[in-house]
Image (tube, rainbow, N blue to C red):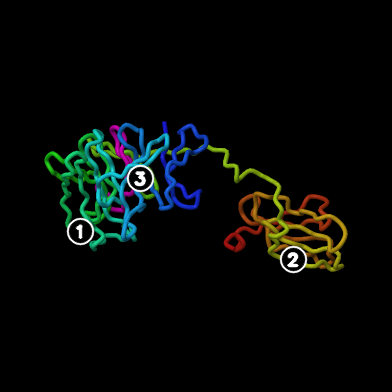
Amino acid sequence: QWIAFTSNRSGVPQVYVVSREGGDPQRLTWYPSASVVRGWTPDGNAVLYASGREAAPTNFMRLWTVPRNGGPSTLLPAPWGFNGALSPDGRRLAVDRMTRWDGEWRNYRGGQNTALSILDLRTLDEVKLPNERTTDVNPVWMGNTMYFISDRDWAMNVWSYDPATRALAQVTRSRDGDIKHLSAGPDRLVYELDGDIHLLDPATGRSEKVNITVRGDFPWTVARWEDVSSQVTAATLSKTGQRVLMEARSEVWTVPAEHGDARNLSQSSGAADRSAAWSPDGKQVVWFTSDGGDYAMVIGNADGTGTPRRVNIAPSKMGWS
């Protein structure tokens, strides 16, 4: 019912929640240090996040929870915690300690690679996963099994770890690209590969791409009045000196030097109009437009009357400029 997310709308990245139906987001963290959402507690009543707040002497990340309805944050007992995930019973915490300065360094085998660990929150006993300097990141839980992304086979793939038997197993075998951003639901894993979202059934090892259709009003694309007087990119004086030909916000205008009205000759706010020029006698204006797809040349009356004449010039280098 709720979506937790990180936003810097207040100036510093902080934790917010919003209803899945939309509405106004609610800010949950207020500390001046950045706070980054990592997930939820199993009961859905609190958000798990990482922050360098109150860390000393250097700024290192630790894991905290904050109630969904707001209130004080609680520090979890993991000494370091860049990322983490709580087991479904809430008794164990999978921890990724290290903040990596270059998460896209493929097949990195340096000191930033530390083993993922599972912390028992009652006894504080900790078990480290076997690690030979591999990049192991993004731990999540499904039932009693922990899943994570690792480059143990030299490409980032999904692996599993069974805390009871301490057995590791490779789940996906991508070769053409790295798997990113692992998440878990009740019975499916979710990951990104090559910009697509995939659902993975660990029981069968089968993945399927999710077809996503985005529906929205996209208010920033709605036609609106705009003051373009400060967006002039070219200007040419007419033969008589009485009007100036201008380009502003990909529209073609003539503007009086002293008296009269501005005229929008192109009137195609959804297209790019450019490289306008006067005819030798000053009675016509020519410009290039992307209106209709391929670039074309348009010739119209300088006083804005009549219907401009369109001359196809495709293919044109104007399409690449």
Q: Classify mark 1: residues with Cα within 10 Å, few (<14), some (14-19) or many (20+).
A: some
Structural distance between the alpha carbons of marks 2 and 1: 61 Å
Which residue is under mark 3?
49
The amino acid sitting under disc 3 is: Tyr
Marks 3 and 2, Cα distance to the nearest angstrom? 53 Å
Q: Secondary structure at mark 1?
A: loop
Disc number lying in front (3 or 2): 3
Is residue 229 visible to the viewer in this orientation of the structure?
Answer: yes
Q: Does the rendering let one see residue 104?
A: no
Q: Position of residue 87 (x, y in %)?
A: 25, 37
Which amino acid is tagged 1?
Arg
Magenta-highlighted residues: 172-191
User: Mark 2 or 1, which is nearer the eye?
Assistant: 1
Let me know if residue 182 is in the magenta part: yes
The picture places residue 215, in percent across and down from the top left corner, at 52, 37
Q: Foreground mark, 3 or 1?
A: 3
Is 286 placed left or right of 33 in the picture? right
Q: Percent from the top left, x then y, of residue 302?
A: 82, 58
User: Residue tagged by mark 2?
Assistant: 235
Depicted 223 relative to depicted 57: above or below? above
**SS class of the residue under badge 3?**
strand
Quick one: 245 or 126, which is closer to the camera?
126
Numbered disc 2: secondary structure:
strand
Image location of residue 288, percent across then percent down? 68, 59
Find residue 133 and name its label: 1
**Nearest the camera: 239 or 37?**
37
Q: Residues within 10 Å of mark 3 (few under 14, many from 20)?
A: many
